[in-house]
Image (spheres, helix red, strand yellow):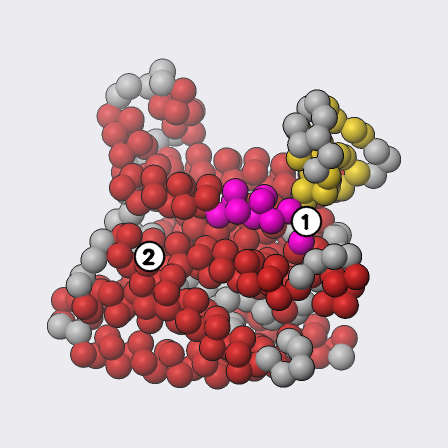
Amino acid sequence: MTATDLAGGPAHVDFGRRQCVVRIGGVSARASWRAILVVAALLVGAVVVAVLAIGVGTYTVAPGDVLGVLLGSNTSFDRVVVMEWRMPRMLMALLVGAALGVSGAIFQALTRNALGSPDIIGVNSGAYTGALVVIAGVGGGYYAVAAGALIGGLVTAVVVYALSYRNGLAGYRLIVVGIAVGAVLNSVNQWIVIKLDFHTAVTAAIWQQGSLNGLGWAQVLPMTVCLAVATALLVALGPLLPVLQMGDDAAGALGVHPDRARLAYLVIGVGLVALACAAAGPITFVALAAPQIARRLTASPGVGLIPSAAMGAVLLLVSDVLAQRLFGGSELPVGAVTVSLGGLYLIYLLISQSRKR
């Protein structure tokens, strides 16, 4: 769904043959019926997995009892388990996954390449570097770490963009430069971890794998607010992302300033990566896989933000459930699962890209 009409008028729905156009006030959104059905199916799947995930654990809560707690009819000890212990982690999995999915869609659209995700081109590593600098310097809370991750990610994105820009921006050149910059930053991150005291170094090393352990309502609220702000900014930009996917010449012919629009999307994309990194560490491969899986399911010519967000949320939630239950009593960081699944997907993507070339 993209905002495509700013003409105004009363709220109504216009049903076309293959697309649905929804107009509310001065903004309209257009989407194919297949995309709507896919997003609806993903949302339903996320709810089902969330209910099952909340109930599974050392203290088991039946799905009916979980629904009872959510509806307010169950006030037993189940309410403490569901609302205080497990609900925040489930919500953070959905929010972080959605942020990574949208960020991956933005970067892949800007580079016009399926490999152009923030974890491939080094933005994740840069965000982690900024967060580590804050942790090593002041120790800071969520907001301080988020600010450090944002600054680190933006600096990395600017460096990669500057080094890869030569008479225009080529997707493959940006990816190669991003991989090189990311490799350097990974070495810097390891050096910082070595220099930290033992307790902080262990915490940073575990956090580096990407983990949702220990997250509570204190993290849910700021993550929700920041994600809502990013969503509002994307809506305010309008339908520029699909135009940018057509190339700079086509975008310029349609009256769009490619560099300005690209910079705005770049800041939002890095901001989303920083939010996810500050909350759960540099979780990899969700931003790479979610937009492309969503694009194939919706059969759309380009990546879409809303399908990518829904797919990212489902992928991270399922990965977190696997991380908690796959090895019985041994709980893994969710990043270990996403790396394993994402590595297989990356191999498939590289093979398919080479065949196309």
The label number, if any, that marks residue 136 in the structure image = none
Mark closest to the chain's N terminus, 1 or 2: 2
Asked if residue 162 is among those painted magenta in the image, a careful observer would answer no
Which residue occupies the foreground of this view, 292 or 189? Answer: 189
Please tell me whether residue 224 is drawn above or below residue 347 in the rendered image.
Answer: above
Count up the numbered dots.
2
Please tell me whether residue 312 is drawn above or below residue 284 in the rendered image.
Answer: above
* Residue tagged 1: 239
* Residue tagged 2: 146
**Residue at the image position 27 percent from the left and 34 percent from the top:** 84
**Residue at the image position 73 percent from the left and 34 percent from the top:** 7
For label 2, the SS is helix
Kindly give the residue lying farthest to the right in the view shown. Answer: 17
Image quarter where the C terminus lies is: bottom right
Asked if residue 237 is among those painted magenta in the image, a careful observer would answer yes
User: Which region is colored magenta?
Assistant: 230-240
For label 1, the SS is loop
**Residue at the image position 55 percent from the left and 58 percent from the top:** 264
Q: CA distance from mark 1 to mark 2?
A: 28 Å
Taking 142 as reference, is 56 left or right?
right
| x then y, percent, for residue 228 | 46, 41
Please tell me whether residue 306 is drawn above or below residue 282 in the rendered image.
Answer: above
